[in-house]
Image (spheres, rainbow, N blue to C red):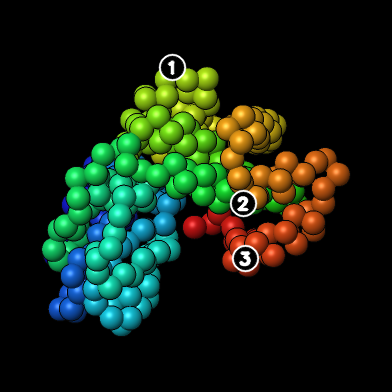
Amino acid sequence: MQYTPTLEGDRIVQEDLNKILEAVKGKNFESLVLYGAYGKGEGCIYEGKPRNDYDLLLVGGDRGVERAIERVKTAVVNEVWHIPSLSGVSCSQKWYEIKYGSKLLAGKPLDLPDWEAWEIPFADAVESINNRCISMILGKYEMMKENPNWRTAVEQTCKGLISIGDAILIRRGEFHPLYSVRALMLTGDEIGKIYKEAVSVKIFNRPDLNPDQIWQFWQNTKAIMRDFVLNNKLQVPNIEVLLAITERTTKEQIEEFLTKAGVDKRFLGKEVGGQ
């Protein structure tokens, strides 16, 4: 078993995935699939290192196979989604991206229907916006630290912006697994320019933004999320917390909310953004 990288020069990604393949060699499972940023060939390589986690779908096999993957020491975290089978799988944004934007690493190809973009439920987009409100709050939290990791702050902000662009596409029955293609599909929309910037940051870490620009980008994204949710009368519980953040909101208040929301403690520590 050997992984062939999509982009020439992704040596570290290739080595990491080959380590994972070696760890599961000879074990019983149905399929091991790389999805997410690297599955679609849009994972960010920043300063010679991968930035996005490796999203891995494990179909079949036991907990031992999952643990073997998680134990492999790689440049970034191995996020394993382990399911017993594909039985009962229906169209969703996540499964649509896996169907059309993933790579089989080992085992059998995924036997999934040939879904159309209009089959993605709009409820998926609303749930994503709700989750990305948390990303936005994490971005704000990072900016308030004594020594902020500005890249982490802008990455979290990009997630919020991209969720709105995706919702626009899903609402009108259009979607594509690649961020770059979605950016082209939104060219004529009001959000088009800033969506393209968010995608460029996510994939290429460009353009480089200074702290003032990142702060303005966060504010602009917050306004876009607010307007989309209110104009479409969506039920997005976390938007209320996001909109309640003002200049007077303290870092401790934001941390308290994030803790109550179940955000992993490691995302609140000094190591945030290091991997």
Residues 182 and 156: in front is 182
Q: Amino acid at mark 3?
A: Gly
Please report whichever mark, 3 or 2, sits nearer to the chain's N-terminal start: 2
Q: Residue drawn at (86%, 44%), measured in percent from left and top?
A: 248
Q: Is residue 145 above or below residue 166?
A: below
Residues 213 and 238: in front is 238
- Give the CA separation, mark 3 to mark 2: 10 Å
Q: Residues within 10 Å of mark 3 (few under 14, many from 20)?
A: few
Please report whichever mark, 1 or 3, sits nearer to the chain's N-terminal start: 1
What secondary structure is marked by label 1?
loop
Query: How far across and down, in percent of the image, does residue 243 sit?
Result: 73, 41
Q: Can you tell which mark lies on residue 172? A: none
What secondary structure is marked by label 2?
helix
Q: Amino acid at mark 2?
A: Ile
Q: Quadrant of residue 111?
A: bottom left
Residue highlighted by disc 3: 262
Residue highlighted by disc 1: 188
- Give the CA separation, mark 1 to mark 2: 28 Å
